[in-house]
Image (cartoon, rainbow, N blue to C red):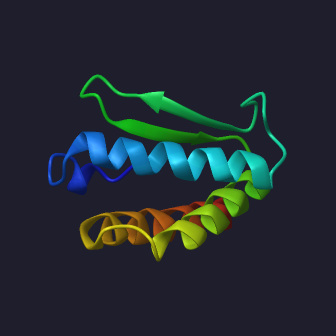
């Protein structure tokens, strides 16, 4: 996911926001054991979301929406695109 954006931003800052979003999404979905929403580190040090079902995708989308307003502008752009990708993926379930 977001292959076109890899390397365009500081991976550490992206990872920080990805972790915040995942944490909130897990709370929304009541998934403390990470069975439905996981963060996987790639070989390049980037974090990717691994989502088990349509409801979990909704939780991640809600979490992104909650965090967008407090993100720096560059991160807002990245996570808006990620949110769009999740919305598309949700229709494929």
Left or right of 82 on screen, residue 11: left
In the orientation shown, which residue stands out farthest toward the left?
Answer: 8
The foreground one among 81 and 66 is 66
Q: Is residue 70 above or below residue 51?
A: below
Residue 59, image x and y in percent? 71, 59
Residue 14 pos. (x, y %): 33, 48
Quadrant in the rendering for residue 43? top left
Instruction: Examine the rendered structure and indicate whether residue 21 appears above or below residue 76.
Output: above
Question: Is 11 in front, or is 92?
Answer: 11
Q: Compared to 31, does 66 lie above or below? A: below
Residue at point 35%, 27% (across, down): 42
**In this rendering, position of residue 39 left or right of residue 53:** left
Tell me if 7 is positioned left or right of 68 in this view: left
Give percent across and percent down for residue 68. 47, 72
Please state the total of marks drawn on the protein image.
Answer: 0
Residue at the limit of the structure toward the bottom, as seen here = 69
On screen, residue 82 above or below 52: below
């Amino acid at each position: 996911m977001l292959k076109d954006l890899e390397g365009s931003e500081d991976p550490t800052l992206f990872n920080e926001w990805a972790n915040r979003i995942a944490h909130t999404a897990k709370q929304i979905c009541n998934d403390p054991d990470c069975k439905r929403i996981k963060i996987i580190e790639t070989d390049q040090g980037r974090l990717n979301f691994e989502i088990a079902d349509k409801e979990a995708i909704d939780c991640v989308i809600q979490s992104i929406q909650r965090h967008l307003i407090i993100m720096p502008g560059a991160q807002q752009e990245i996570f808006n695109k990620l949110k769009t990708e999740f919305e598309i993926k949700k229709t494929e379930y």
